[in-house]
Amino acid sequence: MNNEQVTHQVRHMIGSRYVASVKAYLAELTGRDVRGGTGYLTADLSPGRLTIHLDAQGNIEAIEIDRSNEQKA
């Protein structure tokens, strides 16, 4: 699944309440590693990995795709 397809598959989650099962759901849906939500974030780069960002109320604010392997223009 390419990044555009992943974005299309996960966008319905934006604004939803974060619960622990969201990581497993996104991983199964996209076939990608997922980090974020609650807990610690590492600084390591993992191309294609999804990072869940939460707002102050614990709702999913964004789901970011690590694009560290893409060529810079």
Image (cartoon, rainbow, N blue to C red):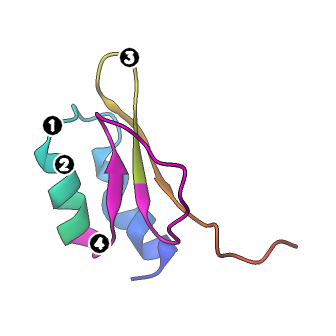
- Foreground residue, 41 or 73? 41
C-alpha distance separating marks 2 and 3? 17 Å
Residue at the disc numbered 1: 19
- Looking at the image, residue 37 sits to the left or right of residue 49; the answer is left
Three-letter code for the amino acid on which mark 2 is drawn: Val
| Residue 33 inside the magenta-drawn segment | yes
| Residue 44 inside the magenta-drawn segment | yes
Three-letter code for the amino acid on which mark 3 is drawn: Ala
C-alpha distance separating marks 2 and 1? 6 Å
- Foreground residue, 26 or 4? 26
Residue at the disc numbered 2: 22
Tag 3 or tag 4, which sits nearer the N-term?
Answer: 4
Residue at the disc numbered 4: 30
C-alpha distance separating marks 2 and 4? 12 Å
C-alpha distance separating marks 4 and 1? 18 Å
Query: Looking at the picture, how far across and down is residue 38, in whole percent?
Result: 28, 33
Tag 1 or tag 4, which sits nearer the N-term?
Answer: 1
Where, quadrant-wise, is the N terminus in this rendering? bottom left
- Which residue is drawn at the image coordinates 42% and 51% (left, top)? 51
Q: CB of mark 3 within 8 Å of CB of mark 1?
A: no
Query: Looking at the picture, how far across and down is residue 59, in whole percent?
Result: 30, 28
Magenta span of residues = 29-50
Q: CB of mark 2 within 8 Å of CB of mark 4?
A: no
Q: Residues within 10 Å of mark 2 (few under 14, many from 20)?
A: some
Residue at the disc numbered 3: 56
Helix, strand or loop at mark 2: helix
- Which residue is drawn at the image coordinates 41% and 59% (left, top)? 50
Query: Looking at the picture, how far across and down is residue 9, in whole percent?
Result: 32, 65
69 is higher (above) or lower (below) than 42 = below
Three-letter code for the amino acid on which mark 1 is drawn: Val
